[in-house]
Amino acid sequence: MSQVEKAQKFLKECGFDGWLLYDFHGSNPHARQFLRLRPDQMTTRRFFYWIPTQGKPVKLVHAIEAHTLDAMPGERKMYSSWQTLESELQAILKGAKKVAMEYSPKNAIPYVSYVDGGTVDLVRSFGPQVVSSADFLAHFTAVLTEAQIQSQLRAGKALDAIVSGMWKWIGERIGKITEYDAQQKILEEFQKRNLISDHAPIVGVNAHSADPHYEPRETGSSAIRKGDWILIDLWAKEKDGVFGDITRVGVADKAPTPKHAQVFQIVREAQKAAANLVKSRFAANKRIEGWEVDDAARSVIRNAGFGEFFTHRTGHSIELSLHGSGAHMDNLEMHDVRPILPGTCFSIEPGIYLPGEFGVRLEFDVLVHHNGHVEISGGEQDKIICLF
């Protein structure tokens, strides 16, 4: 089945009349991915690609970039003036009542909402209702190939090895290094393993670990001393591979404090609750949506009395991008009703952040194989790492 035929199957199931893919200057990465456009391909003019539920697709491209969509099947129509663009688009959409686009009502799922409001207005002016492509989009953007799945597993294994080595490295240098020094050491390890990342990793001690997106800098970073609580969050991938993303915590001492141990255990139970829900649903061949996974983790933390200190979603989609286009484990920042699909990857990373004290985040990745088997990637942390 071709990509277009697969899209038509989903459109029919959703009761839509077609899918209108649109891009301007790279504004819609999902459309570009589906349309197999090279990252370096010059596209400086608006283009549309119409996939009707039945029938052949239609390309609408500017005359000076007439070959933009040559890799895709369908009839080609060209425009130069804005008047021609509008008249051709209106003709293409004639009779369509529900047109799917990368649009999310009220921007409820911003990872889908890439079509600007003016373009949505234009399509609506021709009569159709614009509906969201969110229900089927991830099948084309977030589902991994087997080679990509293996790259993610390798990335997770490499990150687990790096962070394991970091505890020994830090322990041997207590009182002599800063958070920034540890961060730079991790980047060196990435380079040794030919891994790349979009941002530098997080190394936060004590109160800095209570800031989920703390960034250690060369000036102003805290020294790492005996007794300090340490959080390490690192993410990377092979070139053209899928990201691994894990977080671990430890203490520069022989044992954690009772409060460290208490908070760690709550977060670990939340992480396991979320993962077990995913495993049980796939084992039973039942649908599971992103918000449900978030609720599973959040209820554990809320019931333990720390709900107000869990300030972010439970997890995010992972693919070639660190924060991908598939379902997110989220019922806090957004209500993600999209299903988790076989062949996708995502993080589970609950946390408790006590301002001025410390934070605990435990993160591993979850791979759902194409056959529905659920695998943890990047390893699991069952106890606090003690450096001495």
Image (cartoon, rainbow, N blue to C red):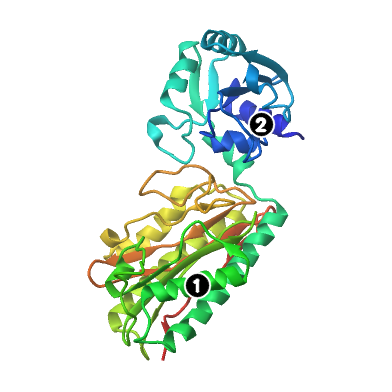
Q: Is residue 379 above or below residue 296?
A: below
Q: Where's residue 1, x and y in %?
A: 77, 35
Which residue position holds label 2?
A: 7
Q: Residue furthest right?
A: 1
Say what secondary structure mark 1 lies in.
Answer: helix
In front: mark 2 or mark 1? 1
Q: Residue at x 68, y 27 (%)?
A: 69
Q: Is residue 302 visible?
A: yes
Q: Is residue 42 above or below residue 206?
A: above
Say what secondary structure mark 2 lies in.
Answer: helix
Residue type marked 1:
Ile
Q: Residue at x 65, y 23 (%)?
A: 65
Q: Where's residue 250, x and y in %?
A: 40, 79
Which residue position holds label 1?
A: 186
Q: Which residue occupies the foreground of this view, 63 or 87?
A: 63
Q: Where's residue 252, x and y in %?
A: 37, 85
Does 199 sit left or right of 157 as displayed? Answer: left
Q: How many marks?
A: 2
Residue type marked 2:
Ala
Does 341 sit left or right of 178 as displayed? Answer: right
Question: Is disc 1 surrounded by few (<14), some (14 to 19) or many (20+) residues within 10 Å?
Answer: many
